[in-house]
Amino acid sequence: MVTKTDTKPGWGRRALDWVTAPVPYGRIAAFRTLCYVYVLADVTLFTNWVYGHAGAPGNLYRPLYVADFLHLPVPTPGLVHTLFWALVVLAPIAATGLYPRLLGTTVFLLFTEWMIIAMSYGKVDHDRFGFLIALAVIPWIGKARQGDPTLTQTGGWALRTTQLAVVSTYFLAAIAKLRYGGLQWMTSSTMTRAVMRRGTFLAVWMLKVPGLLVLTQIGIVIFEMLSPIVFMVGERLRLWIVAFFYSFHVVVFLTVTIAFVPHLIAMASFLPLEKPVQAIMRARGKDPSQIAEKTRREKATTTSEPVAAG
C-alpha cells in the first residue's frame, strides 16, 4: 500500500526561501556601485560638516550608545581627517568591485564611525539605518559583475535584508510617533511647525486650509504603518509601491526641504538595477549571457552555492 506524503515545505523553509530568493549578480554589482558612490558623495557633500568636528572641543561630544559599548575614542583632528581621506580614496575603488570583501568591510567600518561621530553632537537621523545595513551585507556577496544574469541566493539575502531595514525605517517611525506622542501626534501641530520653519512656497498655502496638515499627519502614520504591504504583493505591484515611496520623499523635499538621500539609495534594493546595464551592454554588442557562463565556470570550482542563469 502506497501512502501519499505531504511534500509541502514547512513555514521555516518557506521563510528561508523568501529571505534568500535569488537575484542576478548584475543587480548586486549595480547596487554595490550605487552605494559606494554615495559614500563618496555623502562625506564630501551631504555630511561634510562632520569634517568641522575635527576641531570641536571634546566636551561637546555625546557618544551614541554603540560608541560607548565599543569604547570608541573621542574624535580628534587626526581621527576625523583619517576617516575622511580614507573614505574618499577607498569608496571609489570599492565601487569598481575590486577586492569586494576586504574593501567593502573596510568602507562599512569607516563610514559607520563617520556616522557615529556625525550623530554624537545632537540629532540622530533615522534615514541612515537602511543604508548602513546595505553597507554591512554587501561585502558578504563577494565578486559580482555588472550585467551578469546569473542568480545568487547570497545576493538575494543581502538585498532582502536591506529591504527589511528600509521598510522597518517607515514602520518603526510610526511606532515611535505613537509611543512618544500617542494618538495625539496625528492631531498635533508637528507639520504646522515644520512648514513654518522650513516650508517652501509649495507648502505655505497649506497653513491657510483648516485641518489639511492634520490630515497630512494622519496619512503619514497610515502610510508608515502599512509600508510592510510591499512584501505581500506581486513584483509588478511592488515596483509601483516603491515608486510611491520615492514620490512621497520627493513631495517631502519640495515642501519642507527634508531629504532622505541615504534611505532612497538603500531603497534601490527593490529595483531591477541590472536591466539598464544589460540594455547598454546589448546596445554595444555585448551579450550578458557570456558573463553568466564565465561566472558559472568560476563558481563551479570555488563554491557550492547553486547558480543559474536569470
Image (cartoon, rainbow, N blue to C red):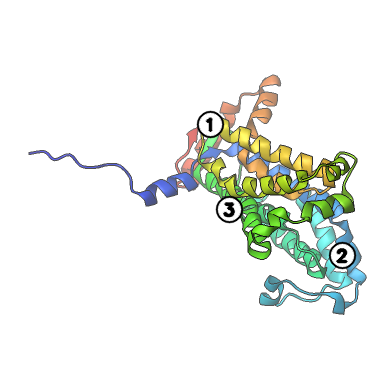
Horizontal relation, residue 179 to residue 189: left or right:
left
Q: Indicate the quadrant where residue 3 lies.
A: top left
Picture coordinates of residue 211, whole percent (x, y): 76, 46
Can you see residue 280? yes
Q: Find disc 1 in the rendering and name its residue.
A: 293
The residues bearing labels 2 and 1 have C-alpha atoms spaced at a distance of 44 Å
Q: Nearer the viewer, mark 2 or mark 1?
A: 2
Foreground residue among 242 and 101: 242
Crowding at dot 1, Cα within 10 Å, few <14 / some 14-19 / many 20+, comes out as: some
- Discs 2, 1 touching: Cβ within 8 Å: no
Q: Position of residue 89 (x, y in %)?
A: 81, 53
Secondary element at image label 2: helix
Going from the N terminus, do you reach mark 2 or mark 3 first? 2
> Mark 2 Cα within 10 Å, few/some/many (few <14, many 20+)?
some
* Sequence-first tag of 2 and 1: 2
Quarter of the image holding residue 64? Answer: bottom right
Q: Which mark is residue 98?
A: none
Q: Give the image location of residue 233, x and y in percent.
A: 51, 36
Mark whose residue sits in front, 1 or 3: 3
Pointers 1 and 3 in contact (C-beta within 8 Å) = no
- What whole-number distance in Å separates the C-alpha atoms at marks 2 and 3? 28 Å
> Disc 2 marks which residue?
81
